Image (cartoon, rainbow, N blue to C red):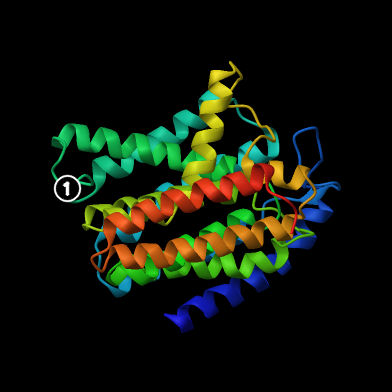
Amino acid sequence: MLALLFTVAAVTFAGTAALLPFLRDRAILDHPNERSSHQTPTPKGGGIVVLVVVLVAWIGVGIFFESGPFLTWIMPTTVFVLAALSWVDDLRGLPPALRLLFQITAVCVVLALRPEPVLVFQGVLSVTLDVLAAGLLWVWFINLFNFMDGIDGITGTQALVIGLGIGLIGSSSSALLGVIIAGAALGFLKWNWHPAKIFLGDVGSVPLGFLLGWLLLDLAAAGHWAAALILPAYYLTDATVTLVKRAIRGEKVWQAHRQHFYQQAVQRGLSHAAVSTAVFAVGGVLVGLAWSAEHGWALPALVSACLLNVAFLWFLAVGKKP
């Protein structure tokens, strides 16, 4: 596992270094605007390298485990198409409704073609409702993962934490796939840490949300439902609370903004690095709680995760600078 983690990280680090001049020469930049948290035009599209490394390793795992065409080819192909469309969005911009349609289509394709209708909700819902609920949650996770990519290092940090948690708790191929994503995130973080030299772009954040969402659903379907809720708890909480608050105020929830709790912390004077480090620390605690949930402490772990996230959101919104 460690060898895989650091090998993927090294390849991603080197690949990103090679991609940077290409993006700069062609002026593929994210320019600051009223909703940005960065101050200077910064190359975007680092997700290209992250996704190439992840998908090559993902296919390799599928072949090694003789996982069949679904895991080995259908999932990577779907992710590749989603990444290509997201790259178009990075370059030219696509209407929000069209982006959402692409994401829903990708989710429906995977849920329809998976070899077995594994019940994510452990039989609590009927098969039809189980598939519908899983699909809705997956689409929401893809979007929240994209929405939350708003300061240097935060999404790489979150992908690293969730990937490591899946690697720790998942079984066989799922664990390896989690470690692969964690390794790619680790390699990219060197370039994305504040002050960021490159951004993931939608080409990175949307497919990563797609892949991590699938692995979390797979974790829940395997009976690790508490861990599947705990590992992404901070992103789920921040994005959902912010969305609900904006909806209540009658704002256009699909538009970019700077109202997430982590963005409020930056606006109050905390550095990108400080906030992302705090997110990493909270993520590490959540991994520990997810591990505890798998060893007979599910309810205490879930309650602790809820209390931790409430306290963390309070700190980000109004807490004093350390």
Residue drawn at 45 percent across, 61 percent down:
286
| Vertical position of residue 51 compared to residue 89: above or below | below
Q: Tell me residue 2's x, y (percent).
A: 46, 82
Can residue 303 be seen in this snapshot?
A: yes
Residue drawn at 54 percent across, 49 percent down:
311
Q: Tell me residue 7's x, y (percent).
A: 53, 79
Q: Is residue 167 left or right of residue 265?
A: left
Residue drawn at 32 percent across, 37 percent down:
135
Can residue 59 be seen in this snapshot?
A: no
- List the single residue furthest toward the top: 250
Mark 1, residue position: 122
Quadrant hosting residue 6 = bottom right
Quadrant hosting residue 36 = top right
Residue drawn at 70 percent across, 53 percent down:
199
Inspect the image, locate mark 1, and give the three-letter code of the amino acid beneath it. Answer: Gln
Q: Secondary structure at mark 1?
A: loop
- List the single residue furthest toward the right: 40
Q: Is residue 259 left or right of residue 98?
A: right
The quadrant of the picture occupied by the N terminus is bottom left
Q: Tell me residue 147's x, y (percent).
A: 58, 40
